[in-house]
Image (tube, rainbow, N blue to C red):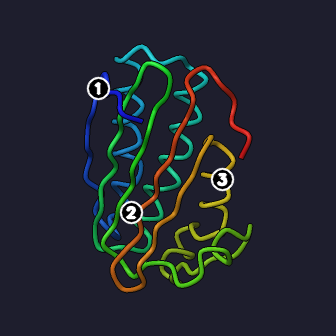
C-alpha cells in the first residue's frame, strides 16, 4: 500500500520439525504485543499464523513467516519450499487434506488449515507453484473482525 511498516520481523520454519511447530507463531504474537496491536487482532493473526506455520511443517522442507505491522493493519507473508498446491480451490475445501500418514498419526491433517486461515484474515492470497512452494499473503485490519 506504499506506507512503511512500523515493525518488520521474519521467523524461520523447519519442515517436519513437529516439535518446533508453533514457535514462529508464538514469536509473531510476541512482536504484535510489543508493537501495541490490540488483543483481538493479535488473536486472529496468531490463529492464522499457526495454521500456516503448521502447513509448512507438514508439507514443506522449510519456510518462513514475515510479519509487517502498520498503523491500520498487520500483514503476514508465509512462504515455503515445498511441493506446492496442485489445486488451490480443492485445498480450500474444508476437510480436504494432502497430509502424510505420519502427520495424520500425530493428529494433524484435518484439512481445516487454509479454511481457518481465510476465516481469521481480512484478505488472503495464495500463490502456488507446483514443485516450488506456496506463498500466503494475509492481511488483518487492526481492531477489525475477520469476515473470511
Circle nearer the N terminus (2, 3): 2
Q: Which residue is mark 3?
A: 116
Residue at figure coordinates x 67%, y 62% from the top left:
112
Mark 1 residue element: strand
Q: Is residue 108 above or below residue 8?
A: below
User: What numbered label is drawn on residue 18?
Assistant: 2
User: What numbered label is drawn on residue 137?
Assistant: none
Residue at figure coordinates x 67%, y 58% from the top left:
115
Q: Mark 2 to mark 3: distance in Å?
A: 20 Å
Instruction: Work out which quarter of the rendered image holds the N terminus and state it.
Output: top left
Q: Position of residue 8 (x, y in %)?
A: 27, 33
Q: Position of residue 65 (x, y in %)?
A: 34, 49
Q: Is residue 33 above or below residue 103?
A: above
Q: Which residue is mark 1?
A: 7
- The residue at the far front in this view is 2
**Are there few (<14), some (14-19), or many (20+) residues within 10 Å of tag 3?**
some
Amino acid at each position: 500500500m506504499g506506507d512503511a511498516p512500523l515493525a518488520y520481523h521474519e521467523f524461520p520454519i523447519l519442515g517436519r520439525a513437529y516439535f518446533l511447530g508453533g514457535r514462529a507463531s508464538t514469536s509473531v504474537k510476541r512482536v504484535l504485543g510489543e508493537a501495541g496491536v490490540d488483543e483481538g487482532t493479535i488473536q486472529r493473526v496468531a490463529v492464522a499464523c499457526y495454521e500456516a506455520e503448521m502447513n509448512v511443517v507438514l508439507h514443506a522442507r522449510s519456510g518462513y513467516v514475515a510479519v509487517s505491522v502498520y498503523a491500520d493493519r498487520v500483514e503476514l507473508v508465509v512462504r515455503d519450499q515445498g511441493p506446492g498446491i496442485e489445486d488451490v480451490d480443492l485445498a480450500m475445501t474444508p476437510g480436504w487434506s494432502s497430509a502424510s500418514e505420519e502427520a495424520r498419526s500425530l493428529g494433524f491433517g484435518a484439512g481445516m488449515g487454509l479454511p481457518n486461515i481465510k476465516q481469521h484474515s481480512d484478505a488472503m492470497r495464495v500463490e502456488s507453484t507446483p514443485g516450488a512452494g506456496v506463498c500466503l499473503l494475509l492481511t488483518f485490519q487492526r481492531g477489525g473482525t475477520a469476515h473470511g
